[in-house]
Image (tube, helix red, strand yellow):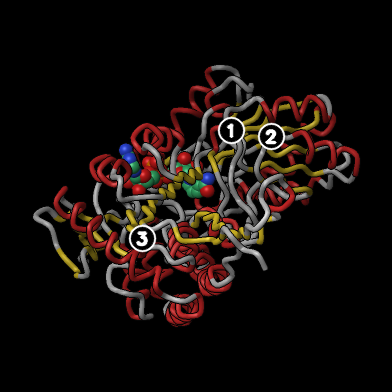
Amino acid sequence: MKMYVGGAWVDSPVMAPVISPYFRETVDTVPEATPDQVQQALAAAEQAANRMAQLTGHERSQILNRAADLVAARVEDLAKTISLEEGKPLSESRGEAGRMPDLLRLCAFEGSQLRGETLPLDAQVATKGKLGFTLRVPCGVVVAITPFNYPLLLVVHKIGPALAAGNAVILKPARQTPLVALKLTQIFLEAGLPESALQCITGSGAKLGKLLCADSRVRKISFTGSTTVGEMITQVAGVKKLSLELGSNSPLVVLPDADLSAVAAATAVGGFVNAGQVCISTQRVLVHRRVYGDFLEAVKKPVESIKVGDPLAEDTRLSAMISEADAERVGSWIAEAVAQGARVVTGGERQGAIFAPTVVADVKPGMRISCDELFGPAVAVTAVDSIDDAIQVANDSRYGLGAGIFTRDLDSALKFARRVQSGNVMINWTPLWRADLMPYGGFKQSGIGKEGPRYAVEEMTELKTVVFHGVDA
Ligand code: NAD
C-alpha cells in the first residue's frame, strides 16, 4: 500500500514489509517515510487545518457519519486486515471493527456540540460595560501516534474526535500495523473529508516521531503507546497540548465473598484477550488468603479451555503475540519469577510467537512479572490479607490505568473505588472493560488526559475568551 501525504497516495524510496506474526508471511508493504515527506505532511496539514476550520459542525458530522456507514459496510475486510497484521483472533477483530461505526457516530455528534459560555464579568469591580463569552475552537494540526494492539479502535479514538472538532490530523500508526489505518484513511477521503485533512504517514516511530512531535506547526499530540515512548515525547514536544495513553499492570482484587467460578471465568477473559496485549489487561490478581487455593483451583479449567491457534479460524480465542521476541520476553519474565519462588499453575510453554495462556502463583509484588507491564497472556497471582492490604498492594505501582474488584460487600467495593489509584475502576468485573463513550485514561505513569468522544473533543479543542468593551445596553 502507499501512504497518504500532501493530498496524494505516495511511495518512498524504501518500502517495509508488514509481516503476519502468526503466518510469518508478508501481508503487504508500506513506505518508510523520509524526513522530506514528513515536512510535506506538516505543510499540507497546516493548509488543511484552515480548510477544516471553515466547515460547520453540521458539515463535519455529515463526513463522519458517512465514514461510519462506509466502515459498517467493510467490517469483514477491516477485521481480516487486523487479524493478519496484528495476529489477534478474527472473532476479536470483528468486535474491534464492528464497534467503529457507533464510535464514529458518537464523535460526529460530540464534534458538532462545541459550546462556550457567557462570563459573569460584572461580578468583579470596574467591569461595567463589558460583555464576555468563550468560544471552543479547534487546535489546528493534531499529530496522532498509535500502538499495534488495537490498530483500528485506537486510531478512531483519536482521529474521530480530532476531525469532528475541526482539526487536521497527521496519523502515524504503529510500524507493525499500518494497513488498517491506511484503509481507514481511504474511507475518510471517500466520505468527503477535505484534501490532507487526514494524512497517514508510515515508518519507524523512532525516526519520524521527533520530526512530528517537535514541530511548532503542531498544536496537539495525541499518543497511545508505552510509557517509555510517552516520556520521550514529553521531552521533545515543547509548548503543545499533550494527551498520553500509556501502559499499565492492572490489578484485580478477589475478596472471600466473591463467586469464585464467576471470577475464574472473567479472569480467563480479562487476562487473555488479544494474548494479554491490552493496556487494561488483568495482570496482577490479588486474592484474599482465605480463598487463595480455591481460586487457583477454579481458574485452571477456564484458562486451559482457551482455544489456541490460527487467528483466522472461527473458534480460536488466543493466537500469536505481535512478535516471537515478545513471546520470548514473556517466557523469560515467568522463568525469572519461578527462580524467585513463584510457580506455574498452568501454561508456561511457547511455540514461536504463541505463548500458552498461563497462570503464575505465589508471585511477590517486587517480581518483574508483577511490577512491570507484562503485556502478554499470563496472570500473576498474589495472596493478600484484607481489603486494606489489597488496596495497598494494588497501589504499589507506578501505573494506574485500570483496576477491578470482585466482592458482594458494598463497603469494600466503595472503599476500593475511592482509594485505588486508577483511572478506571470495575466493580465485579476485571479491569478489562471499556465502553467507547466513557472517559478513559490513566493516573500516574499511565498517562495524561482522557479519551472517549466527549472528553477527547474537549482535549482536541481550545477555549478562547472574547470580551466586548464599551457595551452600554
Ligand atoms: P510503542 O510505545 O512501542 O509504540 C507506540 C507508537 O509510538 C508506534 O506508532 C511507534 O512507532 C511510535 N514511536 C516509537 N518511538 C517513538 C518516538 N521516539 N517518538 C514518537 N513515536 C514513537 O507501543 P506499542 O508496543 O505499539 O504498544 C504497546 C504499549 O501501548 C503498551 O505499553 C500498552 O499498555 C500501551 N497502550 C496503552 C493504551 C491506553 O489507552 N492507555 C492503549 C493501548 C496500548
Labels 2 and 1 touching (C-beta < 8 A): yes
Q: Does ligand 1 reach within 8 Å of label 1's beta carbon?
A: no
Q: Secondary structure at mark 1?
A: helix
Q: Is residue 240 left or right of residue 283?
A: left
What's the residue type where badge 1 is placed?
Lys
Name the residue furthest top. 340
* Image spot of residue 160 (x, y percent): 47, 65
Q: Mark on residue 169?
A: 3
At numbered mark 2, what does the secondary structure look like: helix, strand or loop?
loop
Secondary structure type for disc 3: strand
Q: Characterize the local packing of mark 2: few (<14), some (14-19) or many (20 or more) Cα atoms within 10 angstroms.
A: many
Q: Which residue is mark 2?
A: 421
Q: Which residue is mark 1?
A: 444
Q: Position of residue 398 (x, y in %)?
A: 57, 28
Q: Residue at x 50, y 77 (%)?
A: 61
The amino acid on which the numbered mark 3 sits, given as a three-letter code, is Val
